[in-house]
């Protein structure tokens, strides 16, 4: 079995294991997923324009 | 979510709503792994009213307890809750036959997996179809069970299309 295949199988087992969590635990996990997504979206809105201008100043982005 | 369960039970007790049941992604998670979702969807049965805004009683009750409206939802604890009047025979049946789950010691009415799948089939967006696949994969529903319920609610053709597209190879 290749390393990648083994890694994918481990990941599938890990995901499968999350089904066994209690419903309140899953709901709390969903709350954390939502909060992470919110922060990512907020980060993108604020960070990307600055990042582009920094790159442009460095001559990396024409 | 516990605050939402407590709120719904209280609203039912005092007659603001006659019945309720959680559906959508938050309900799906009883059977599947956790999924990303923004809000909690709740089917409600309302007492008959002559008011144009049928949800006004819910909004007033929530506001009196400090839960404020946020767009189309009411923010209850960490969850924006969307209240949807049971609008069809399918959703009425789903609410009436809901299970009473336990959420950290609080009874919480939740739509059963088969009804969740057929409601998702009736809506038909990509994320709804994904929900049906997740429920099937979890073993909480069977193709035959969904098929029977879909036919009873005149969604037999939609189910056939779904089976041909995703399940029949």
Image (cartoon, rainbow, N blue to C red):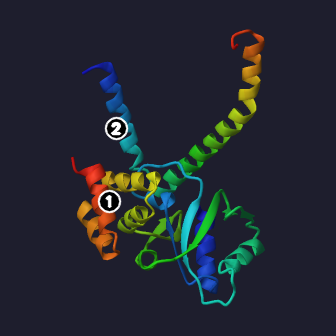
Subunit ID for the residue under disc 1: B
Q: Residue furthest left?
A: B169
Kindly tell me whether residue B122 is visible in this rendering.
Answer: yes
Q: Position of residue B110 (x, y in %)?
A: 47, 69
Using the image, determine if residue B137 lies above or below residue A3: below
Q: Position of residue A27 (x, y in %)?
A: 53, 54
Q: Name which residue lies at 71% across and 74% down.
A: B59
Closer to the camera, B165 or B60?
B165
Numbered tag placed on residue B140 in the rendering: 1
Closer to the camera, B17 or B84?
B84
Density class for disc 1 (Cα within 10 Å; few <14, some 14-19, many ≥20) is some
Numbered tag placed on residue B22 in the rendering: none
Kindly tell me whether residue B139 is visible in this rendering.
Answer: no
In the rendered image, which residue does mark 2 sit on? A13
Q: Position of residue B108 (x, y in %)?
A: 51, 70
| Secondary structure beneath label 2 | helix
| Distance from the alpha carbon under mark 1 to that under mark 2 | 19 Å
| Secondary structure beneath label 1 | loop
Q: Name which residue lies at 30% across and 51% down.
A: B165
In the image, B11: left or right of B24?
A: right
């Amino acid at each position: 079995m290749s390393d990648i295949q083994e890694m994918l199988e481990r990941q599938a087992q890990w995901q499968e294991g999350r089904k066994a969590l209690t419903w309140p635990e899953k709901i709390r996990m969903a709350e954390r997923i939502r909060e992470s997504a919110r922060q990512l979206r907020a980060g993108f809105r604020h960070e990307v324009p600055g990042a582009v201008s920094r790159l442009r100043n460095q001559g990396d982005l024409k | 979510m516990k605050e939402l369960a407590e709120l719904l039970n209280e609203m039912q007790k005092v007659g603001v709503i006659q019945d309720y049941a959680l559906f959508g992604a938050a309900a799906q998670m009883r059977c599947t792994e956790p999924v990303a979702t923004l809000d909690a969807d709740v089917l409600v049965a309302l007492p008959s009213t002559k008011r144009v805004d049928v949800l006004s009683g819910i909004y007033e009750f929530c506001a009196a307890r400090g839960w404020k409206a946020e767009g189309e939802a009411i923010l209850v604890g960490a969850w924006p809750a969307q209240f949807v009047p049971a609008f069809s025979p399918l959703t009425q049946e789903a609410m009436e036959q809901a299970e009473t789950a336990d959420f950290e010691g609080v009874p919480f009415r939740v739509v059963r997996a088969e009804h969740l799948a057929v409601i998702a089939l009736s809506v038909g967006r990509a994320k709804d179809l994904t929900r049906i696949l997740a429920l099937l994969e979890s073993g909480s529903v069977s193709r035959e069970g969904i098929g029977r319920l879909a036919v009873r609610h005149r969604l037999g053709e939609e189910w056939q299309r779904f089976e041909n597209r995703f399940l029949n190879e």
